[in-house]
Amino acid sequence: MRKRKGIVLLLVMCLVLWGVSFVSAEEDPFDDLWDRIDGSTATVPLVQAMRLHFQGKEARLQHSTTSFAYEKLCNDYFDIDLIFVTPPSPGDLDVAWNQAVELETIPVTREALVFLNNVQNPVESLTVQELRDIYTGRFINWSEVGGQDAAILPFQRPYRSGSQSLFLACLMGSETPMEPAMDLLVESMGLLIDQVSAYNNGPGALGYSVFYYATRMYANEKVCVLAVDGVMPNAQTIADGTYPLSTHYYAVLRKDTPPDHPARQLVAWLLSEEGQRLVAEAGYVPLIGDVPAQPEVDAEEWARTRVSSGTGGTEPREHTFHVWYRTMIPELPEDVRTLAGAWWAQASMELYGEETELVAASYRPGSSAILNLAMRTDSDEEGNFQRRTAVVDIGQKKILQLSDLFYDGVNYIDYINSHIAFSADRGSVHWEGVPPRPSEENNLTIFTGLPNDHPYFLFFDAHTVELLFDGGSPFWDQSGEYYYEPVRVFVPLNHWVSPWGGCTVETSYRDHPTSAERAYVGALLFPVPSLRIDGGNMPEAEARINAKLAQIAQRHIAEVDSWVCDDEWPEIRTEVFGQYAAVMFCLIGQHPMGGAEVKSELSINIFDLHTGEWFDTDELFDTWKDSPQAVYVARDTWQEPQEILTDYRLPEGMRPASIRLGYTYPEGLTLNYYFDIIEEGWLWMELPLLFILQEEKSS
């Protein structure tokens, strides 16, 4: 019988529960070193444990992932003294050589490369040679290794990622793996595990990760760890070397680091008996001493995060969502206003000790079918606050529970938690307030999952639920050093699980080098997007869209010299509206007040998710700019009220400077073309996107 592991809670506080000791902050000899440490995603808990031990307090950490950690260690610009990573790849060594840096690698924990398949796959063990035969393309069907008659889908990670470097070193040796198809090349470790666990990949999927990440940080009950040469990877077989794909995590520093440098002193402590005890207490396999015990999973807590049943009926619901609007939202029915007012009065009494009246200004953006209500207290000095939210169903005249957003019988919390992926996938989960570039280091922490009675949620748009948290949530940085607001998580509602659902899109990326060089990181990398539609259930449309996106990305890469700037970087943003998606190739730069903002768009591309059809926004502009559907809006300044220009015609030859998507009421989704400042002041043109796309398809 194969065992399925539940997701393991790995908050910083777990380090305390596992017995990690700590000293007072005043005694911390490494106080000036912590901000100069980087590493891979899987070594975040190790550094957290050390910092907790020496400082006696929790710390939010950001690791840059393996390849970028090596880049930063070798480049003086970043002021990094020590990294905790897997062994350097040939590419990492090239980076060091180009910077005239000699690296020193010191093993600090044991680790292993592990292979994963879907629980639907009966194969429990593969030999080293069988794995090589699969990844060189000699074996292409699971029946060739004792499994079912199903094509093998061998996922890989990008070049220079930590797990890819281990894959090449531990498994492939002198052999070269086959070039993966774009949809089998996965940007992050978390997304790879998600892909292996996905129901539509089923018995075909095969992937790999490092032992600690796959079993401690991102364990997934829909994924099984395979034995290799008949040996199951666990702490004991990794420690005694019987598992054949064993390796280490390393402390890496520059070889010219002085003997008395704090980085060397910290590594020396970590190699001591006390340090190796901390390694085991944090769940890693130590070089010496007892192996860590497998943490117990609370069965009741696991059930709350994995078992549920939807109560939203059996029929789909339609609604037009209002995000910003030219006129007021229509008046609410009196009985709905009464219901909403009663909730508002009760919430204000609970939070403030007195009832307040619900007024129109209190409404959060809503739709023709729902009304969002939200209230929260101010944060205290420690960042704690209280929150209340409500979603009012206007038609059914009731306040919705989380289960009401999903069809009857749907295991909705499993669906939600499967989408809360600690990965690069900005199409599934958005972290408010984090750097916009997709990256694993944006994660605040690893957690079991949301409970099925999570109380705080709103509609973000017509097909997306916004999950919110109070000041005690695992996502909240108590120090306030990085975020002034809690993280908000957005999960798309798919039409096959939710009556409010539409097509869902998951976006992954592979970095493609360009000819442009940057002083502080070397070659500029361009993220090439790949969409996964409805969890892989739309393969033909998906293939058409991804082929077009690759073509568009190659054009932008070829034109890099015309748009590259040292203080800007490329980013892909994906927005989904029903059966349509907009994929925007943007340039991002620093905002003068802090954070990042879109500086310009290289292109904005509209796709029909059902057919894969691409709509040329330039052609749409030329076709519709003089039509009755084109609404021209002007402002003297951005502070002045907007003015609708009737019977307006653009000056001959004028082209838009940029394009954005937006909403207006009652038109709904609009394609907005912005022009440089002219006589009318600020000018833009709004096209009702859904209407014109339907007209384009019917013509």
Image (spheres, helix red, strand yellow):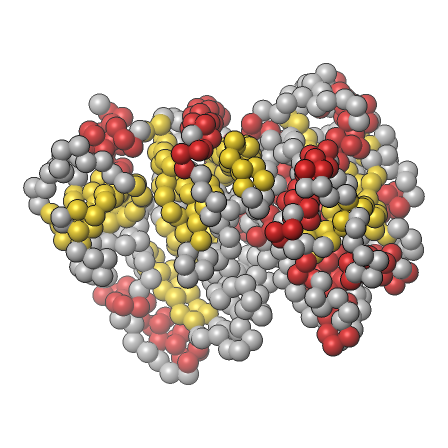
Q: Is residue 684 left or right of residue 20?
A: left
* The C terminus: image quadrant: top left
Q: Is residue 566 above or below residue 199?
A: below
Q: Is residue 654 left or right of residue 585?
A: left
Residue 9 falls in image quadrant: bottom right
Query: How far from the left and from the top, in percent, is residue 583?
Result: 40, 37
Going 40% across and 70% down the picture, which residue do you hit? Answer: 375
Going 82% across and 35% down the picture, which residue do you hit? Answer: 245
In front of the other: 682 or 501:
682
* The N terminus: image quadrant: top right
The answer to whether residue 147 shows anywhere in this view is: yes
Going 22% across and 61% down the picture, which residue do you hit? Answer: 639
The answer to whether residue 294 shows anywhere in this view is: no
**Farthest front residue in view:** 100
**Farthest bottom residue in view:** 353
Q: Is residue 138 above or below residue 208?
A: above
Residue 238 falls in image quadrant: top right
In front of the other: 651 or 461:
651
Going 17% across and 56% down the picture, which residue do you hit? Answer: 636
Query: How far from the left and from the top, in percent, is residue 493?
Result: 44, 45
- Numbered circles on residues, count: 0
Query: How far from the left and from the top, in percent, is residue 534?
Result: 47, 35
Q: Is residue 234 left or right of residue 519?
A: right
Q: Is residue 349 above or below residue 555?
A: below
Q: Is residue 80 above or below residue 471?
A: above
Query: How far from the left and from the top, in percent, is residue 564?
Result: 44, 39
**Farthest left residue in view:** 647
